[in-house]
Amino acid sequence: MIPQTAPDKGSAEWNQNLNMTLMCKDCKEFPPNLVEEFSSGDMVCGSCGLVLGDRIVDTRSEWRTFSNDDQGNDDPSRVGDGANPLLNGSQLQTTIAFGDGNARSRDLLRAQGKSANDKATKGLLAAYKEIGAHCDAVNIPKNVSDTAKHLFKLVDDAKAFKGKSQEAIIAGCIFIACRQCGVPRTFREIYALTKVSKKDIGRTFKALEKFFAQDSNSKIAMATAAGGKLRVIAITILKHINTPFKGNLQATDAYKNTTSTNAKDLCLRYCSQLGLKSQQFVKVSQGLADKMSTVGDLAGRSPLSVAAACIYMASYLLGKPKTPKEISQVAGVSDGTIRTAYKYLYQERERLIEPEWISDGKGKMENLPVG
């Protein structure tokens, strides 16, 4: 940093120039040719590339404005918190926090609560809170909770199921979300969680499946109709660049109907709850569950009893036996049911058990109880 030279003495009036000018010590050009690189935060000489300063503050705006894409003279600035897709409206309202404040803060909070008449948002927040509490109570992953909230918002936006109980709709959304995310729960588990009867959960589940499928199909039809011209343009561009075009340009978030819970999906969770956390126990029990369809006597049994019987056989086969009573407390079926299902497994043991499961001393066929 060097001070500027004083002006000529012959001028009308001389005043000391207190401005400081940053100049390149190699080029010594005046006026200096300096470039501010905001991406790296450096001040660089444009002639020789010498770095003259660092930690340059970017004084430009924090957002980008696209005037051509402006809709209704609304400036799409990037200021403020991101919008929550699970809520309605602009979400730019002010919230007065009470915390440990005084009586005046409490009065302001009450006054603001009375003035805010957005009942729809309040109802959504209450439902989201209930869904989150249910999922946290049984350690259901957060992605399942978010999926259940999204499903509930679809129902709320469509104003469907007016006469249905909100608790039943929440239970149905959680049940479907668990299946969609690959962590299925049974009707009995959802009943124990939400206290909604299994009959109501089953009815609501079927109605929700039908509603989501119809809503998804209508959205895909609208997107296909609106995107017909875009599809033609895309095919033309891909032909010019010699790229083969495959498939249709459709919405990727189409709703997929869930399949019934099978015994294989339950084995992993039941093994973890029983303390059988070795991957070998999960592999053997799931392998047995895959082959259950070949056992004719067990074809119509509940997946709960099938999974419990497979874990019972795998625990004895690998030398860490679990009693039917212990398994029944986790699976929610009686120990007599587990023993009955195991008898059919024991009769087909030579065909069901793979040699690699018991090779190298991993397990012994002799460890299996007779019945």
Image: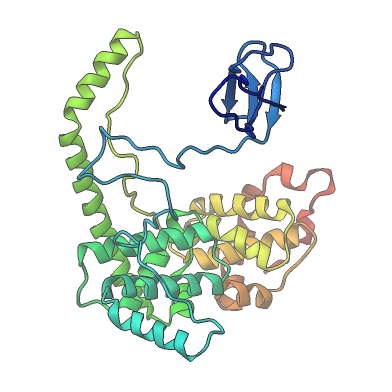
Total residue callouts: 0
Q: Toward which corner of the image does residue 26 lie, by quadrant? A: top right
Residue 239 location in percent, x, y? Answer: 29, 11
For this rendering, which residue is in front, 322 or 293? 322
Residue at the farthest left position: 225
Q: Which residue lies furthest to the right in this view?
A: 361
Residue drawn at the location 63% of the way across and 21% of the way down: 9
As drawn, 230 above or below 63: above
Residue sitting at the far bottom: 103
Which quarter of the rendering shows the N terminus? Answer: top right
Q: Give residue 242's position: percent from left, percent from top.
A: 34, 8
* Front residue (pair 350, 201): 201
From this view, report whether residue 129 is shown above or below residue 247: below
Please indicate whether residue 277 sits to the left or right of residue 184 in the image.
right
Which of the 4 quarters of the picture holds residue 226?
top left
Q: Does residue 208 lie above or below 246 as drawn? A: below
Q: Mark yes or no: residue 132 visible.
A: yes
Question: Which percent across, then down, holds residue 231?
Answer: 23, 25
Q: Which quadrant of the figure has residue 268?
A: bottom right
Q: Nearest the camera: 101 or 228?
A: 101
Query: Going 64% across and 21% down the picture, which residue do you hit?
Result: 44
Q: Can residue 299 be seen in this view?
A: no
- Which residue is found at the position 69% from the left and 29% from the top? 53
Q: Where is residue 294 in the image (x, y as percent from the top left)?
A: 50, 50
In the image shown, does 130 or 85 lie closer to the viewer?
85
Asked if residue 289 is positioned above or below residue 75 in the image, the reply reads below
Q: Quarter of the image containing the C terminus?
A: bottom right
User: By what rule are the colours in the image chosen?
Assistant: rainbow
